[in-house]
Amino acid sequence: MKLLVPALAELDHYAEALRRGGYFPDNIRREVSAREELAKIDADPASFVALLDDRDAKAGPVTLPDGSTVKRLPGYRRWIWDDGDSGGDGGGFCGHIGFRWQPGASMLPPYVLGHIGYAVVPWKRGRGYATRALALLLPEARKEGLAHVDLTTDPDNIPSQKVIAANGGTLVERFTTTDAHGGGEMLRWRIML
């Protein structure tokens, strides 16, 4: 398993995962985020792929679940890719992991729930892809000079909590998100770098 910089050569695999359903680029905005990304892929595939590696925050504002927009942070997404035959399905696209940061600071603005987010396609869950992807991403996060990274989970998302704990994460707090994020209860985890 490896992390791939998104590229046009693999874009069809990513788009197919979005079309297949149950996999979302944004775990909060779910189906809406999948439809938005498919529309961007259809409109301009090359631009879509280029903006998935956005270390200069050129992609413009981010739309929050309540429809408000906020300043984008530098960040990038990597595709979780299996070259082998893990589980008999021929490998290929397994999901994504994304990293965003505030230059010069380990803390994030209040409108950003965490530094790292990830999702694995439903048909490949339970095989350790998210755990391995997070382990592969942490050395890259260290290069940004951060003291730690924060990740958030729903209180009932035990698989994601296990992924974070397996990578050295500890529970920092239980909190209620802002109205812009739906006002739901979340858990904040921290991995020291």
Image: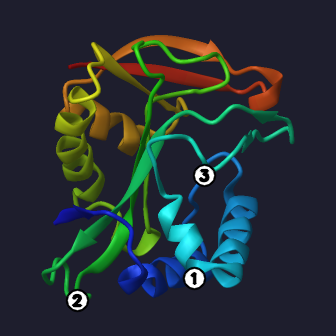
Q: CA distance from mark 1 to mark 3?
A: 15 Å
Residue 9 falls in which quadrant of the image? bottom left
From this view, report whether residue 180 is shown above or below residue 43.
Answer: above
Please tell me whether mark 1 sits on a helix, a strand or a loop.
Answer: helix
**Residue type marked 1:** Arg
Q: Residues within 10 Å of mark 3 (few under 14, many from 20)?
A: some
Numbered badge on residue 123: none
Q: Position of residue 2 (x, y in %)?
A: 18, 63
The residue wearing badge 1 is 20
Q: Earlier in the sequence, mark 2 or mark 3?
A: 3
Q: CA distance from mark 1 to mark 2?
A: 17 Å
Q: Earlier in the sequence, mark 1 or mark 3?
A: 1
Quadrant showing the N terminus: bottom left
The residue wearing badge 2 is 90
Q: Residues within 10 Å of mark 1 (few under 14, many from 20)?
A: few
The residue wearing badge 3 is 26
The residue located at (57%, 82%) in the rendering is: 20
The residue located at (26%, 43%) in the rendering is: 134
The residue located at (16%, 79%) in the rendering is: 83
From this view, report whether residue 96 is shown above or below residue 155.
Answer: below
**Left or right: 179, with 121 as reference point:** right
Q: Residues within 10 Å of mark 2 (few under 14, many from 20)?
A: few
Please tell me whether mark 3 sits on a helix, a strand or a loop.
Answer: loop
Q: CA distance from mark 2 to mark 3?
A: 26 Å
Looking at the rendered image, the disc whose residue lies closer to the viewer, 2 or 3, is 3
User: Residue placed farthest to the left in the image?
Assistant: 84
- Name the residue nearer the viewer: 15 or 31: 15
Q: Position of residue 39 (x, y in %)?
A: 73, 76
**Left or right: 147, with 65 as reference point:** left
* Colour setting: rainbow
**Residue type marked 3:** Asp
* Tag 1 near tag 3, CB within 8 Å: no
